[in-house]
Amino acid sequence: MFTGIIETLGTVSALEREGGNLHIFINSDLSEELKIDQSVSHNGVCLTVVGLHVGGYQVTAIDETLQKSNIGDLRVGDLVNLERCTPASGRLDGHIVQGHVDQTATCIARVDQEGSWVYTFQYDSTLGNMTVEKGSIAVNGISLTVFNAAYDSFSVAIIPYTFDHTNLHQVSAGDVVNLEFDIIGKYVAGWLSRQQPSYQAPL
């Protein structure tokens, strides 16, 4: 489990395709603390460390991950948001994040408000996901609070620290981000759909 509080940024140093898989090599300050088989969130995608090298490590994304996230769009030199799993004794500073991306969204606006930034994202609402006003969402693995929640879009406000210490400062209109919707909301929607077969999440 993760919390959506990004620890540091990693840099993609190399990419290798092998069949439907993508091997990703990351350089990061966390590398010396990692071990093989450890889970790390990359832009909100939980990937397993499969190799270590000086100053970096390797993870592998399978086709399912590439289809449902922006991991397949990575290029050498790109910055990646990194977070290790939350220890059982740790604080839940963000919200419950599983590292299982539900779908992607497109940034449709980025507004500089002279001290903060407001991003608006649009997503495919036909997949059954939804946001609620003041609810939580993970954008590229970052725990954020929703406002202006609509049937297929939402906005988030970014403080300077988050802007500077995550890859959101590289996201502009037209860019694709990963979304993980709130797990509690997904359970509620799933329970309602079983109790009322005709139930559909509100638009």
Image: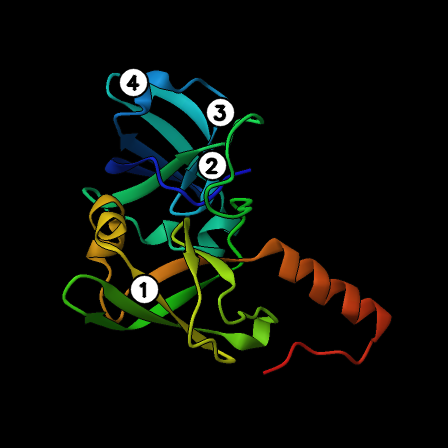
What is the total number of numbered labels drawn onto the structure image? 4
Q: Quadrant of residue 27?
A: top left
Of the two numbered discs 2 and 3 on the same chain, state the one appearing first in sequence.
3
Q: Which residue is mark 1?
A: 157
Q: Which residue is mark 3?
A: 38
Question: In the image, what residue type sits under mark 4?
Answer: His
With 93 as the anchor, is 184 left or right in this view?
right
Of the two numbered discs 3 and 4 on the same chain, state the one appearing first in sequence.
3
* Contact? badges 2 and 1 (CB < 8 Å): no
What residue appears at the point 49 percent right and 24 percent down from the top-left corner?
A: 38
User: How would you rate the neighbour count of disc 2 (Cα within 10 Å): few for under 14, some for 14-19, many for 20 or more?
Assistant: many
* Contact? badges 2 and 3 (CB < 8 Å): no
Whole-number angstrom distance, CA of label 1 to CA of label 3: 32 Å
With 40 as the anchor, is 24 left or right in this view?
left
Question: In the image, what residue type sits under mark 3?
Answer: Gln
Foreground mark, 1 or 4, reads 1
Numbered disc 2: secondary structure? strand
Q: Quadrant of the N terminus?
A: top right
* Relative depth, front residue between 70 and 107: 107
Q: Which label sits on residue 47?
A: 2
Of the two numbered discs 2 and 1 on the same chain, state the one appearing first in sequence.
2
Foreground mark, 3 or 4, reads 3
Residue 182's spot in the image, x, y percent?
57, 57
Q: Which residue is mark 4?
A: 53
Question: In the image, what residue type sits under mark 1?
Answer: Ala
Numbered disc 1: secondary structure? strand
Whole-number angstrom distance, CA of label 3 to CA of label 4: 15 Å
